[in-house]
């Protein structure tokens, strides 16, 4: 087994996002105007809005949640994963749940869906969080109440002061009371939330980083276990153990961490996120987040690295619905997201099928640290495919979006596809699934010549053609994709090879291929396409991206960079940054 998968399951397991037949996505899309409310309450930008909200981690299907964990807010790892509790605190709570025998039937949520600046210690922010008149509190209660409506909830765990206060507010909103307030939420009238609901509180693990006592935090966890043990003694049928878990509350509890299962994260999420500790840090006055490898360090301590500017970007090609804001997922077309491939295809493209494992890319010549994994291999759909595309890696955006070709080149490809009548019926396969932008042409071609690499791509191609026998158009973008396809058996398909967008003369090349494409009798999404392209770009459709992806992502050109060793032309193998575009960074709060 790959050492980066330890205790996480397999990377082809993934969270598809909110079920589209339920109200979760609609509830999340009704997020209040945090920036406006925060500024009105505190006189300043109280929330770290730049990388958006995060709403949950865990199960959203009916009757799947026994334990609801409530926290205060997310941090930068959560911002990158678009899921709650994926960093250090999430790892502490994952271990705690595992000790309780809960390994799947949980749901993590927070007091605030946006991170806050500073601490939760001002009266103004507490009022914003807990007042019955607060839109933020009302929205949170709507979400929590939907948890109750969908599940037979057994246990609520409040992590930290803000979470405990949120539990008190919630209980009171349902007509219950908490005699000792947030000092002891275990004596709140949990029955108003459900007949089997018990409530317990623990200190926030992050308190240790702010000068708090680790011993006191551990003691609060041990005390919570004792409370739970007592409830189980009174009713052994309460809080049953999950099928794949075990429970022995007589054992000594070790205050430790556990990694986040892959099944809790969107397909294609880089493996550093959820590893069991923090893997990123904010930079550039909230403008960027830096991701570091297993060989790197928080804030690059001990390493001297640099990036090429701030990747300002532009809004050219950006498009959204009235009511959307760029730093949130779509609020209007809130069901526009990619749930990920089927289980069989997920396993295949992640190298999970016996005999079709991805090789050790570093042994083949790749330099990037293997702890980042190989996730962003596709974009589009695996069914109803009219055009199949193989495309060279063109930017580092894919590392952060979990999907192929999402930077500037992909945005140009998107517009080009529309010009040939294709708006959604495509599948893009990236060549290769790891970062190779630092390698020479010869080094990349050597990897493509590996028999195992070709075997995996051939199996993927065969699967796609079997499911979509009507495909008549095969495109390649870039020299490496053309090279790979030339080594595959593509049957009667005659690939049309185009330059990658960043190659010299690409516009003229793309224009010259329009007549060749037009002569092919392939099915289209647009009855009478223009077959005219002049270098335009379009933002990546939200239907191509995982749930939680912000509107500005997949737009505004390349949004990510790989670091270089300072003072040299050598690429670092350990650090990447994603940058907010300037036009979003400069936006005032929405009215």
Image (cartoon, rainbow, N blue to C red):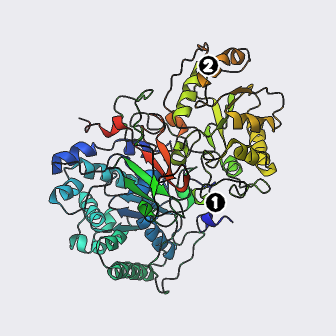
Compare marks 2 and 1 and give the one earlier in the sequence: 1
Q: Which residue is mark 1?
A: 10
Give the residue at the far front of this rendering. 567
Name the secondary structure under disc 1: loop
3 to 125, vertically: above or below:
below
> What x and y, as percent, mark residue 409?
55, 32
| Nearer the observer, 49 or 395 | 395
Check contact, mark 2 vs mark 1: CB within 8 A.
no
In this rendering, would 166 be left or right of 289? left
| Nearer the observer, 411 or 542 | 411
> What x and y, as percent, mark residue 297?
47, 64
The residue depicted at 28 percent of the width and 59 percent of the height is 170
| Nearer the observer, 557 or 247 | 557
Name the secondary structure under disc 2: helix
Q: Is residue 150 visible?
A: no
Q: Callout 2 environment at 10 Å: few (<14), some (14 to 19), or many (20+)?
A: few
Q: Quadrant of the C terminus?
A: top left
Query: Residue 482's mark?
Result: none
- Viewer-nearest of labels 2 and 1? 2
| Nearer the observer, 330 or 418 | 418
> What x and y, as percent, mark residue 321?
39, 29
Q: Which residue is mark 2?
A: 508
The residue depicted at 73 percent of the width and 38 percent of the height is 464
Q: Quadrant of residue 3?
A: bottom right
323 to 89, vertically: above or below:
above
In this rendering, would 361 be left or right of 41? right
Q: Quadrant of the N terminus?
A: bottom right
160 to 20, vertically: above or below:
below
Q: Callout 1 environment at 10 Å: few (<14), some (14 to 19), or many (20+)?
A: some
> What x and y, as percent, mark residue 383?
67, 35
Mark 2 and mark 1: Cα distance apart in space: 43 Å
Q: Quadrant of residue 432?
A: top right
């Amino acid at each position: 087994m790959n050492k980066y998968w330890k205790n996480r399951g397999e990377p082809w397991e993934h969270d598809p996002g909110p079920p589209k037949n339920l109200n979760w996505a609609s509830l999340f899309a009704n997020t209040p105007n945090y920036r406006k409310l925060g500024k009105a309450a505190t006189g300043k930008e109280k929330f770290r809005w730049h990388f958006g909200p995060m709403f949950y981690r865990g199960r959203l299907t009916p009757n799947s949640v026994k334990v609801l964990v409530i926290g205060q807010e997310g941090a930068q790892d959560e911002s990158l994963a678009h899921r709650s509790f994926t960093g250090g605190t999430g790892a502490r709570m994952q271990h705690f749940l595992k000790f309780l025998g809960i390994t799947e039937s949980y749901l993590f949520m927070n007091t605030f869906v946006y991170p806050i600046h500073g601490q939760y210690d001002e009266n103004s922010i507490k009022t914003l969080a807990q007042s019955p008149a607060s839109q933020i509190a009302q929205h949170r209660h709507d979400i929590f109440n939907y948890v109750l409506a969908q599940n037979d909830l057994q246990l609520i765990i409040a992590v930290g002061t803000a979470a405990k206060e949120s539990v008190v507010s919630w209980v009171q909103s349902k007509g219950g009371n908490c005699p000792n307030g947030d000092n002891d939420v275990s004596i709140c009238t949990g029955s108003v939330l459900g007949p089997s609901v018990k409530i317990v509180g623990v200190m926030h693990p992050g308190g240790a980083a702010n000068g708090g006592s680790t011993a006191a935090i551990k003691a609060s966890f041990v005390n919570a276990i004792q409370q739970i043990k007592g409830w189980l003694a009174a009713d052994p049928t309460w809080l049953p153990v999950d099928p794949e878990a075990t429970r022995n509350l007589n054992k000594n509890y070790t205050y430790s961490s556990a990694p986040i299962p892959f099944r809790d994260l969107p397909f294609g999420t880089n493996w550093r996120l959820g590893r069991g500790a923090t893997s990123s840090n904010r930079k550039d006055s909230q403008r960027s987040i830096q991701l570091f490898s297993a060989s790197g360090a928080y804030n690059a301590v001990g390493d001297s690295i640099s990036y090429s500017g701030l990747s300002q970007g532009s809004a050219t090609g950006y498009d959204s619905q009235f009511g959307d804001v760029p730093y949130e997922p779509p609020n209007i077309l809130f069901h526009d997201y990619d749930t990920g491939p089927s289980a069989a295809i997920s396993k295949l493209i992640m190298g999970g099928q016996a005999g079709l494992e991805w090789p050790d890319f570093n042994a083949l010549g790749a330099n990037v640290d293997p702890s980042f994994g190989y996730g962003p291999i596709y974009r589009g759909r695996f069914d109803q495919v009219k055009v199949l595309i193989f495309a060279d890696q063109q930017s580092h955006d894919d590392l952060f979006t979990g999907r192929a070709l999402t930077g500037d080149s992909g945005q140009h490809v998107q517009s080009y596809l529309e010009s040939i009548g294709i708006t959604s019926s495509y599948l893009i396969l990236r060549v290769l699934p790891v970062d190779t932008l630092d390698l020479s042409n010869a080094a990349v071609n050597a990897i493509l010549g590996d028999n195992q690499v070709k075997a995996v791509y051939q199996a993927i191609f065969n699967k796609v053609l079997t499911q979509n026998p009507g495909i008549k158009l095969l495109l390649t973008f870039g020299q490496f994709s053309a090279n790979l396809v030339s080594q595959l058996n593509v049957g009667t398909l005659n690939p049309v090879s185009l330059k990658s967008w960043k190659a010299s003369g690409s516009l003229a090349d793309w224009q010259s291929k329009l007549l060749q494409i037009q002569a092919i009798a392939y099915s289209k999404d647009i009855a009478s396409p223009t077959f005219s392209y002049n270098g335009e770009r379009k933002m990546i459709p939200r239907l191509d991206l995982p749930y939680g992806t912000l509107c500005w992502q997949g737009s505004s050109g390349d949004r990510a960079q790989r670091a270089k060793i300072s003072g040299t032309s050598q690429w670092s193998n350990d650090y990447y940054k994603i940058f907010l575009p300037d036009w979003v960074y400069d936006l005032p709060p929405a009215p």
